[in-house]
Amino acid sequence: MPVLALAGLRWGEMAGLRVGDRVSVPGPGLRLSRAVLASEGGGALYVDTLKNHRARTVPLVAELVPIIDRWSAGKEPQAWLFAAPGGGPLRESNWKRSVGWRAARVAAGVPDVRVHDLRHTAASQWLAAGADPKVVQRVLGHATAAMTMGLYGHLVDASLWQAAMLIGGTTGHLSDWRAHSNGIRAGAGCEKPLGTGLSDGSRLGESNPRPTHYEGVLVRCSRFQSPRWLHVRRLLLAAIVGC
């Protein structure tokens, strides 16, 4: 699950990974070039191209490297990275049963969360960390940065004040920034939820739009505060371990 929540992969993209898809230059990552999907009604699994028919490389955050190492150990390059017990590709419904997904959602207080919503968690974390929207677009595999901003632009609003503080005062000197930042109350002018009332039109045709309860990220000026969805991964992980 951390791979979905930190790398922003779609389920089919993760299921379609082979051991040989790991890359190390210029840094640790995964090369996505296929997806494993289920036929209508949960039928047979089949290998397909990616959603936008473009391969991409997703960088791995440090937390994911040992996880990928563990799942790769002792496997041939053509083996499925996240394989089912029988050696074939992993089916989402079987995975959810094996980890107690339904019970975990209830225990975490998010009974309606979908596996795909972990992808939204990843986007939130990348943007909150200050990643350029163009970078996030490439990580998520969106067709354009405009699509990424249409979905998650409200999270970028918080960086306006953060950028202003980094640039400084009227002269741009660091001393001006220190004097200016000392006079700013944490959260001043930024305490209302951002992104509420986002119209369907701003989602640019996304086939898996954010659920409505995803809206309303609380951000403070002095530093990013974790919005509710940044806690979902930890809550679900804790619930799954406890099941």
Image (tube, rainbow, N blue to C red):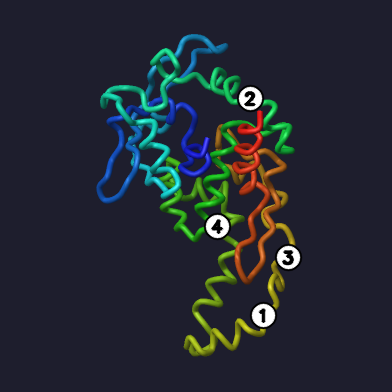
The residue lying at 33 percent from left, 35 percent from top is: 55
Quarter holding the C terminus? top right
- The secondary element bearing badge 1 is classed as loop
Looking at the rendered structure, the secondary structure element under dot 4 is: helix
- Looking at the rendered structure, the secondary structure element under dot 2 is loop
Q: Position of residue 232 (x, y in %)?
A: 64, 42
Disc 4 residue type (three-letter): Ala
- In terms of sequence position, does the residue under pointer 1 or pointer 2 come before the other? 2
User: Between marks 1 and 2, how big is the CA–CA gap?
Assistant: 46 Å
Tell me: 82 left or right of 233. left
What's under tag 1, amino acid-wise?
Ile
Vertical placement of residue 186 versus 147, above or below: below
Do tag 3 and tag 2 residues touch (Cβ < 8 Å)?
Answer: no
Residue 100 numbered mark, or none: 2
Q: Nearer the viewer, residue 25 or 148?
A: 25
Q: CA distance from mark 1 to mark 4?
A: 20 Å
Q: CA distance from mark 4 to mark 3?
A: 16 Å
Please, what is the three-letter code of the amino acid marked with disc 3?
Glu
Chain-order first, disc 3 or disc 1: 1
